[in-house]
Image (spheres, rainbow, N blue to C red):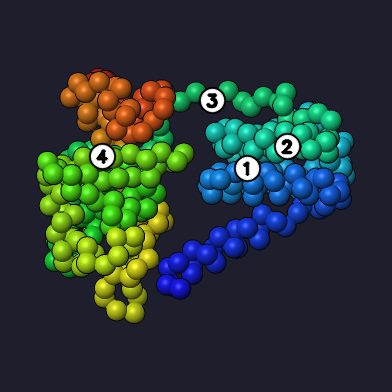
């Protein structure tokens, strides 16, 4: 078994083992509660990120409830409300916690462990965002970043091609990390990249000419195109020798690479891979591209989410405050 596949299997087994460890309050509630726990976390939730977030939220709440000397059947809406009053995290994070707790208690009701869902009537604090919190990167900064990469080594070529993919496709870092060799496809008139996006969405995005050059040069020099097409397109560096490994770069790897390149280019390291999505969205909207077209490029099902990436208003505000005469 290849090392990267063995590592993936081991990581999956570790996550499954963590999910199977029952909190004390669930174990004491009997077999039906244990069944509901396993069904919810290992049966119903297919997205790994959602599973981890909900698992953390539910464990934290049940640990708190246990400290209040309450068993599962005696948890009330008032207790859930008290928990969130005492919880010192950001409002968007509270909403994720509440969503996970509600969904889990729904399963407990379905399996007749409890009669009513105590989290169902609890409301989270109001939160409205007119602009996302993703750090901004400008078009000029992106150009500066790309030109700062010397393109002398295979790692240089990989990093330039990866950063180019982030900006010219507006894809999420996780989706870029999942790209396989077979996902870079020559369709005749042009190449396309086939992404597996969040929520199980599959999308094909055309590759513009300079990104195509970046990718083809990287693939040629790295020898990426000569192996099995199921192997990752963007790979980590083997620490034992100066060449690429067979392991795919994940979101953390991509973020670390970007921070290193930002530092070398003299740019703010607060910028993240997600910043390129905001940059692409704002630039296209400034050029008069229709919101629905930008929404499609970003893969959003709701245009209100796309508007969070629009930084045009921030630019207007910056111009206004600079005109204050004080």
Residue drawn at x 33%, y 45% is: 195
**Residue located beneath label 4 in the image:** 205
Q: Secondary structure at mark 4?
A: strand
Above or below, comparing residue 194 to residue 18 in the picture: above
Q: CA distance from mark 2 to mark 1?
A: 10 Å
Q: Are marks 2 and 1 in contact (CB under 8 Å)?
A: yes
Q: Residue 127: give its label.
A: 3
Question: Residue 124's x, y, as percent?
Answer: 64, 27
**Residue located beneath label 2 in the image:** 107
Mark 2 or mark 1: whose residue is earlier in sequence: 1
How crowded is the residue under tag 4: few (<14 C-alpha within 10 Å), some, or many (20+)? some
**Residue located beneath label 1 in the image:** 44
- Residue 320 placement: quadrant: top left
Q: CA distance from mark 3 to mark 2?
A: 27 Å
Residue drawn at x 84%, y 30% is: 115
Front of the two marks 1 and 3: 1
Left or right of 177? Residue 186 is left
Residue 190 in view of the camera = yes
Front of the two marks 4 and 3: 4
Question: Residue 170's x, y, as percent?
Answer: 29, 39
Above or below, comparing residue 123 to residue 269 in the picture: above
């Amino acid at each position: 078994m290849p090392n990267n596949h063995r590592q993936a299997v081991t990581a999956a087994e570790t996550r499954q083992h963590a999910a199977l460890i029952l909190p004390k309050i669930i174990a004491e509630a009997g077999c039906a509660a244990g069944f509901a726990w396993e069904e919810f976390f290992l049966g119903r939730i297919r997205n790994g990120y959602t599973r981890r977030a909900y698992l953390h939220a539910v464990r934290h709440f049940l640990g708190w409830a246990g400290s209040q000397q309450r068993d599962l059947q005696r948890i009330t809406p008032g207790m859930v409300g008290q928990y969130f009053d005492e919880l010192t995290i950001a409002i968007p994070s509270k909403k994720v916690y509440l969503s996970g707790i509600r969904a889990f208690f729904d399963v407990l009701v379905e399996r007749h462990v409890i009669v009513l869902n105590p989290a169902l009537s609890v409301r989270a604090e109001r939160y409205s965002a007119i602009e996302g919190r993703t750090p901004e990167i400008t078009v000029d900064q992106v150009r500066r970043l790309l030109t700062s990469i010397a393109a002398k080594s295979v790692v240089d070529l990989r990093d330039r091609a990866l950063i180019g993919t982030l900006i010219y496709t507006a894809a999420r870092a996780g989706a870029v990390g999942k790209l396989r060799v077979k996902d870079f496809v020559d369709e005749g008139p042009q190449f396309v990249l086939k992404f597996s996006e969040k929520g199980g969405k599959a999308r094909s995005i055309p590759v513009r000419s300079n990104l195509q050059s970046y990718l083809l040069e990287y693939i040629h020099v790295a020898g990426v195109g000569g192996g099995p097409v199921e192997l990752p397109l963007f790979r980590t560096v083997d620490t034992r020798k100066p060449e690429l490994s067979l392991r795919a770069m994940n979101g953390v790897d991509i973020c670390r690479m970007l921070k290193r390149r930002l530092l070398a280019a003299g740019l703010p390291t607060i910028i993240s891979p997600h910043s390129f999505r905001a940059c692409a969205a704002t630039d296209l909207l400034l050029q008069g591209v229709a919101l629905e077209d930008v929404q499609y490029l970003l893969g959003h099902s709701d245009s209100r989410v796309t508007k969070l990436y629009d930084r045009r208003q921030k630019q207007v505000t910056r111009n206004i405050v600079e005109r204050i005469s004080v």
